[in-house]
Image (spheres, rainbow, N blue to C red):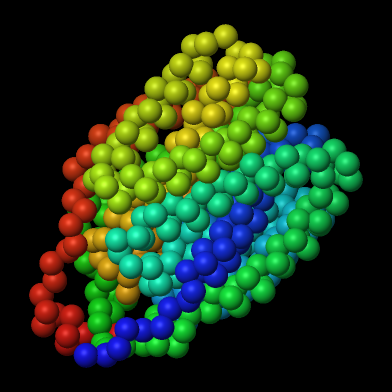
Amino acid sequence: MNPSPRRLPLLQLLICSSLILTLTMGIRHGFGLWLQPVTQDQGWTRETFSFAIAVQNLSWGLLGILAGILADRWGGWRVLIGGGLLWALGLSGMALSPSPLTFTLSAGVLIGAAQAASTYSVIYGIIGRQIDPERRSWAMGLTAAAGSFGQFLMVPTEGWLIAGIGWQQALLALAVATLLIWPLALWLREPAAQSPASGSPQQSILQALREAADYPSFRLLMGAYFVCGFQVVFIGVHLPSYLKDQGLAPQVASTALALIGLFNVFGTYGIGLLGQRWPKRYLLAIIYGVRSVAITIFLLMPLTAWSVYIFAAVMGLLWLSTVPPTNAIVAQIFGVRHFSMLSGFVFCSHQVGSFTGVWLGGLLYDRNGNYDLVWLISIGLGVLAAAVSLPVREAAILRAPQRVANSAP
């Protein structure tokens, strides 16, 4: 029997992973603050900005599959270094774009690629290989909580930068900050004995894809994750403008987004802990169902600053709390050999939902003059996601030994 492979020190793994997610997810969740400054300064419609962010989410999802394949084969730290460079280029291009096309290419395609190479699929692939299964849900919840803390920390910082130095200079400052990913990625270089490409022949990429595509629970997870993306990105991008349209001060929106990030620290970490004890499919059903209830109550209540803050706190507890159980189920069913790639496919569905939510929000606002229909769609989709989460089977898939043994790596 081979000796146990060397692993990264636990504290080093968690700190570096958490810092990367704090930075990347914090910047990502603040893009809604740029909607009105950019469109007013450039003379563009909200649909123009929304379409660019929609492309960003779609690019993130589609390229996340490629990033996962590269991370599984060549190591996540290399992909993270590329992600840091893409962040710097994308944010700089977003600041300096003279037209909607170049804005979409930078804010959409480049930043989407940067997120694909520097967020959950890649980070969780490293964690999945370095953490024992019985602690995996906890570790994923902890790092997701760090991403949520990034929202709490970075969104007010981004609002302060926009107000203090202007939206273009704020983007350039963030572009420089993202280069901090480089030294952090070097600390996540996995020991050679634990490298993704080492070991005896196992499933090929094509076999892993066929196996997952034929497995009903994998498809159900993808469907529910579509809804997650639709809801959170619509709210994250359009909530500031929705509140301003209703006569509330811009500080209310900044505070609400920060509260979402703060309470999501507790939500994601708590769900990560509960995922060690309760069936994760039940947790997912509860999260999606309660989201629909929270949105319904928010729309029925008189709109005040305090009703917004309460809504933000409740949504914060549910915001990214789908991430740890969804990814833990994927690893639990299929193992970690192709985890980054399979996680990338599930997340691609999330990002198709994100594309739909953010773009539809801008499109229907421009046509109807309000967000009412998109709010109603979000409620209905949440109920549907809760229903499709319940039949998910979490047990490890049974494989025929000879099919794996005879396959090429």
Quarter of the rendering occupied by the N terminus = bottom left
Residue 217 placed where, x, y %? 22, 52
Kindly give the residue lying farthest to the top in the view shown.
302
| Residue 288 in view of the camera | yes
Query: Residue at position x 27%, y 68% from top?
Result: 335
| Pick the front one: 211 or 280 | 280
Q: Which residue corresponds to the image point at 81% horizontal and 57% vertical from the top-left?
A: 172
Q: Nearer the viewer, residue 196 or 88?
A: 196
Q: Position of residue 328 (x, y in %)?
A: 33, 56
Q: Position of residue 69 (x, y in %)?
A: 42, 73
**To which quarter of the image does residue 235 belong?**
top right
User: Residue 358 sits in which quadrant?
Assistant: top right
Report x, y in % for residue 177: 75, 61
Q: Tell me the quadrant of the picture where the C terminus can be found.
A: bottom left
Tell me if 310 is positioned left or right of 378 in this view: right
Residue 136 higher or lower than 158, as above or below: below
Horizontal side of 144 relative to 97 (left or right) equals: left
The residue depicted at 53 percent of the width and 24 percent of the height is 311
**Relative to 325, does residue 206 appear above or below in the rendering?**
below
Instruction: State left or right for residue 232 relative to residue 136.
Output: right
Identity of the residue drawn at 65% across and 56% down: 23
Q: Note whether 143 is above or below 271 in the view shown.
A: below
User: Would you say residue 67 is visible in this rendering?
Assistant: no
Counting every numbered tag in the picture gives 0
Q: Which picture quadrant has residue 288?
A: top left
